[in-house]
Image (cartoon, grey):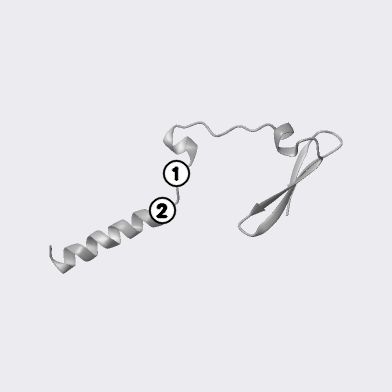
């Protein structure tokens, strides 16, 4: 194997690894469904940690869901 071919193959592998994962709708799979009752478990608010940032999912008195940072 020549050095040029090896470098080209490594770069191609790195490009593939850096690609974001496919979304369920892109691969034909259904997204996972979770009820709000299951998430909130009787509480009116849930803290969600996403990439070192905390978000809050809150249910209003009218039954609407609000996601805030």
Tag count in the figure? 2
Q: Where is residue 38 in the image (x, y as percent from the top left)?
A: 71, 33
Left or right: where 32 falls relative to 65? left
Mark 1 closeness class: few <14, some 14–19, many ≥20 residues within 10 Å:
few
The relative height of residue 43 versus residue 17 in the rendered view (above or below) is: above
> Residues at badges 2 and 1 in contact (C-beta under 8 Å)?
no
Q: Where is residue 2 in the image (x, y as percent from the top left)?
A: 13, 66
Q: Residue at x 37, y 55 (%)?
A: 17
The relative height of residue 3 versus residue 20 in the rendered view (above or below) is: below
Quadrant hosting residue 34: top right
Q: Which residue is drawn at 48% across and 41% down?
A: 23
Numbered tag placed on residue 56 in the rendering: none
Placement of the N terminus among the 4 image quadrants: bottom left
Q: Residue at x 23, y 62 (%)?
A: 8
Numbered tag placed on residue 22 in the rendering: 1
Numbered tag placed on residue 19 in the rendering: 2
Left or right: where 2 falls relative to 22? left
Q: Position of residue 45 (x, y in %)?
A: 79, 44
Q: Which residue is drawn at 73% across and 55% down?
A: 69
Label 1 sits on a secondary structure element that is: loop
Left or right: where 57 falls relative to 23? right
């Amino acid at each position: 194997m020549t050095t040029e071919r090896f470098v080209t193959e490594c770069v191609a592998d790195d490009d593939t690894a850096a690609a974001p994962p496919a979304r369920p709708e892109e691969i034909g799979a259904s997204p996972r469904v979770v009820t709000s009752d299951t998430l909130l478990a009787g509480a009116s608010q849930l803290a969600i940690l996403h990439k070192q940032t905390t978000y809050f999912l809150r249910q209003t008195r009218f039954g609407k869901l609000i996601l805030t940072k």
